[in-house]
Image (cartoon, rainbow, N blue to C red):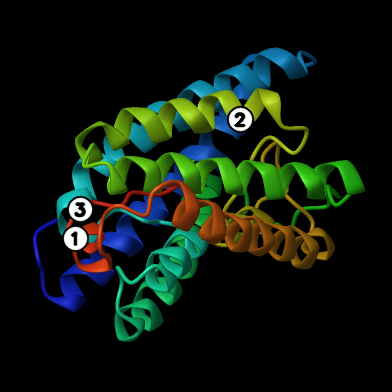
Amino acid sequence: MIAAPLPRRALAEFLGSAFLAATVVGSGIAAAHLSPGDTGLQLLENAVATAAGLFTFILMFGQISGAHFNPVVSLVDSALGGLPRRDLLVYVPAQFAGCVVGAVVANVMFGLAAVSISTTHRASPSHLFAEMIATLGLLLVIFSLARTRRGQIAPAAVGAYIGAAYFFTSSTSFANPAIDVGRMFSDTFAGIAPTSIPAFVAFQLLGGAVAIGLIAMLYPDLTAEEAGEIMVPPSV
């Protein structure tokens, strides 16, 4: 990863997060319009667009910031010795701000109110467990590649994982606290009610905590300094 100045990396995280949220929310709105009454097809359209978007956004911004776009990815990277704590305090606000802006932009692009608070409640026990698994799996994909010097295939691997996780998790794999907050601002197919967000974030952080232990056990071969030199990408 190129050692870009922190302001440039923060801008990349903001823009990447905004494009990601716009893709998730915008493709959800489009899917609902294109395939009314067919939830399965809507989810497929949403998943394909998100997976393709992730692939391209990681390519766009990965060499600047590492293309995290996800506070849990940044937290785990910092805990494993990659991202300095000073940078973490800049990355996380940029990711949250980007996801909110991206959701608002998606609403406006489809002629909806810029902000509409979602009423879709998702925090059932099965959904919360799914969020822990989705986040754990995402982090294992990312850091297994980083710690085995295969970061160049991360754009494809992360996109493929998220596309699959839309279907193999009951929650459709948010796996990202910033995306949780961004999707709150769109009362559409991809939205999530504010009351569901605290529990979602808690279980995503739990998945991150489990991932730290598993990554340390499974991939201990690189030092923190070596791991920090390899691009570490994101999620939804």
Sequence-wise, the earlier of marks 2 and 1 is 2
Seen in the picture, residue 45 relative to 4 is either above or below; the reply is above
| Residue visible at 22% across and 49% down in the picture | 62
Tell me how far mark 2 sits from mark 1, CA to CA. Answer: 29 Å
According to the image, label 1 marks what residue?
226
Tell me how far mark 2 sits from mark 3, CA to CA. Answer: 25 Å
Cβ–Cβ under 8 Å for marks 2 and 1: no
| Residue visible at 20% across and 36% down in the picture | 152
Tell me how far mark 3 sits from mark 1, CA to CA. Answer: 7 Å
According to the image, label 2 marks what residue?
165
Seen in the picture, residue 189 relative to 102 is either above or below; the reply is above
Cβ–Cβ under 8 Å for marks 3 and 1: yes
Q: Is residue 56 left or right of residue 202?
A: left
Q: Is residue 133 visible?
A: yes
Single out the mark in the foreground, 3 or 1.
Answer: 1
**Hey, what amino acid is under mark 3?**
Ile
According to the image, label 3 marks what residue?
230
Q: Is residue 217 left or right of residue 94?
A: right
Q: Nearer the viewer, residue 125 or 80?
A: 80
Q: Dot 2: within a 10 Å radius of its alpha carbon, few (fewer than 14), some, or many (20 or more) residues? A: many
**Percent from the top left, x then y, of residue 164?**
56, 23
Q: Nearer the viewer, residue 39 or 175?
A: 175
Q: Is residue 110 visible?
A: no
**Hey, what amino acid is under mark 1?**
Glu
